[in-house]
Amino acid sequence: MRDTSCNLDGTHSQRYEVKVTRAPAVGSLLAARPSSPVYAIRSGQVTPTMILSRPPGRRKNLSSFSSQYIQSLSRLWQLHVGLLLLLCTGVTSGAAYQTRFSGMIGNVTVTVGRDASLSCTVEDLGEHKVGWIHLKRQMIVAVHTRMISRISRYSVTHDSHKTWTLHITGVTEDDAGYYMCQVNTDPALSQVGLLEVVVPPNIEDGNSSPSEIQVREKTDVVLECSATGAPEPRIMWRREDGEMIVTNTRKPEVVHDGTKLQLHQVSRTHMGAYLCIASNGVPPSVSKRITLHVEFSPQIHVPNQLVGVPTGDNVTIECFVEAFPRAISYWVKANMMILNSEKYYYEAVETLYKIHMKLTIYNFSRNDNTTYKCVAKNSLGETEGDIKLNEIYMSPKAKEIRSENSKTEEETQAPVETETEEQRQVALEPPKGDQLYDNSPSVLQTPKPTKRVLLPNDVLGGQRSGPNSSGCLLPTMLLHWVLSLVTCFVNLPAFALNAKLC
């Protein structure tokens, strides 16, 4: 409540008291209801009401004046009352409009489970009160420092009645939405801020394909993956081994988008692990591994079905098997299974549906000159491959030559020592000090022999240069050339000059 006194006439000391009272904007929840003033309620809000009163006892003093003076005073009183209403109304309105917001609440984004805060800054709040309302729930959260909501995760703090902050701990998805900050002025001041709650993606196993899928070859398969989150997650498929994905469109792709992955007439090439990855920009992204198994009967590929082996050598034969479920593989000779021994060594390298079978036979002899079989079995069938080994006779001389050639190859393939970087730098460094004239054996190097160029006889004029030649071959050729020129000018016989020179 505010008391405003206005002195309209200094001569007559006519004094009027104007009492202006304001009630909160949210009704009885915002403030206690005074007993004396009268409130006007419109649209569920309490509006300010002015009560104009005149001090008691003045009417007795006015009755002593003359009627003319009373009339003039009455007109003057009406004029002053009008001015008083105008002035006092202006003061009251000015006081109301001084209360204002100094900034926006803004939008706040928070991950579910964390804490969030919304701040509302009010200038010149005075006796007004601030309330918080959650519009989505249509719920009054707080009025000033009094909590109205029964949700214990909400709390309100203020900084010298200027900045009012709504705190929410352990944010849930239901807390998302618009929040209104309202001040009970006339008219009420309000502004709205958005609390956005984001949720990391989560794959729903109940609505997704199982982790292991086993189907027969040449059937259609649909892999499904469902995920939740806010915003809605994006789902993409990849193969764990990095291979291309072949869908119904027959267009291979590295990444396939969508909740469903449809594979048409699957084969063994479709077999493997597929990753369903869900992401929505809120870390962390999640994935689910779905392994596709394609069942088919064993198939064997034999690279060399006929192999010649020299007597006494070691030989290794091999077969490639493809089967799923995984096949049982072994080698057979003369209807007998071969086991590891000093004569035979069997090994197999297995992957998802492939088996690389190897059999090594030591010191091949005439008894080993027969047919070997690689066999593979699983629940869907059985298959085998044949490899025929033939003995190649070699004479003792051929064996000796072959052993010498193998030794030569080993020596040739021996590593060659290369010059290190330090040795290269030392060799390139110029000699220093006394080393310029150091003729010690450790410094000197054997000069490389020079190659003498031998020219044909027709170029040398029938003579060949050599270590015992006199060395006058080139001067003789030059003299012949010079004398030929001189002969042209002097007209002398060339043979005479040649005789003198020789």
Image (cartoon, rainbow, N blue to C red):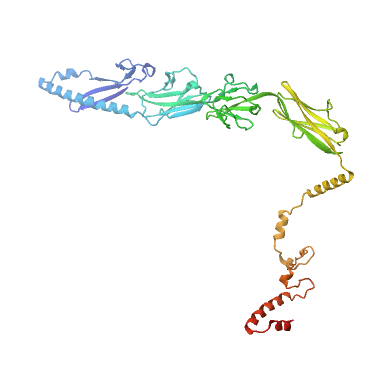
Horizontal and vertical percent position of residue 48: 30, 21
Above or below, 463 relative to 217? below
Q: Nearer the viewer, residue 398 or 89?
A: 398
Q: Residue furthest top?
A: 35
Q: Nearer the viewer, residue 168 or 216?
A: 216
Which quadrant of the structure image shows residue 310?
A: top right
Which quadrant of the structure image shows residue 339?
A: top right
Q: Can you see residue 342?
A: no
Q: Can you see residue 304?
A: yes
Q: Nearer the viewer, residue 124 or 225?
A: 225
How many callouts does the rendering have?
0
Horizontal and vertical percent position of residue 59: 18, 18
Horizontal and vertical percent position of residue 125: 37, 27
Q: Nearer the viewer, residue 297 or 287?
A: 297
Please give left or right for residue 135 compared with residue 308 in the image: left
Q: Residue furthest right?
A: 396
Please give left or right for residue 245 compared with residue 335 in the image: left
Please give left or right for residue 388 compared with residue 187 in the image: right
Q: Quadrant of the N terminus?
A: top left
Horizontal and vertical percent position of residue 369: 85, 33
Which quadrant of the structure image shows residue 225?
A: top right
Q: Quadrant of the C terminus?
A: bottom right
Above or below, 418 relative to 54? below
